[in-house]
Amino acid sequence: MDAASFNFLSAQVKIDAKKRSVFLPYVCNVYRSDFGSDGVVCLSHCLRFLEEHDQLSVAALLDNGVVSIKFLKPSEVFHASLSEMLAV
């Protein structure tokens, strides 16, 4: 599960340092109440599944104040790629 989570989140999470925004896949919005309703808490749970440079970018944003957490729109591509990863 860790490998599938890493592959999925490292490919889907987008960071816009200029706009101080982090975009998480829609599935994170669906299940964020499992981690607490706060988007930052959800993001913090996703961090360990990101590449090191992305972890550092997000940490720098969080250290410097307010970060906007946004959720990408649902897409069949997410479901198909997740299904493929879980089938392995």
Image (cartoon, rainbow, N blue to C red):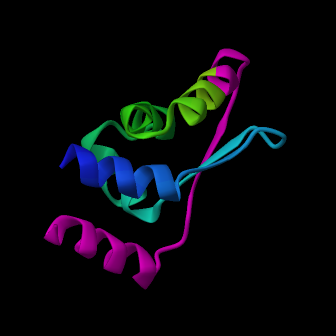
23 with respect to 33 (left or right): right
Q: Outermost residue, right direction?
A: 18
In terms of image quadrants, where is residue 31? bottom left
Image coordinates for residue 43, horizontal then vertical, percent: 46, 38
Q: Is residue 42 one of those drawn in magenta?
A: no
Q: Residue at x 25, y 66 (%)?
A: 85
Q: Outermost residue, front direction?
A: 88
61 with respect to 2 (left or right): right
Image coordinates for residue 53, horizontal then vertical, percent: 60, 31
Q: Residue at x 44, y 33 (%)?
A: 47
Q: Residue at x 75, y 38 (%)?
A: 20
53 up-or-down from 82: above or below = above
* Nearer to us in this view, 69 or 5: 5
14 with respect to 42 (left or right): right
6 up-or-down from 51: above or below = below
Span colored in magenta: 60-88
* Nearer to us in this view, 60 or 41: 60
Quadrant into which the C terminus falls = bottom left
Q: Is residue 85 one of those drawn in magenta?
A: yes
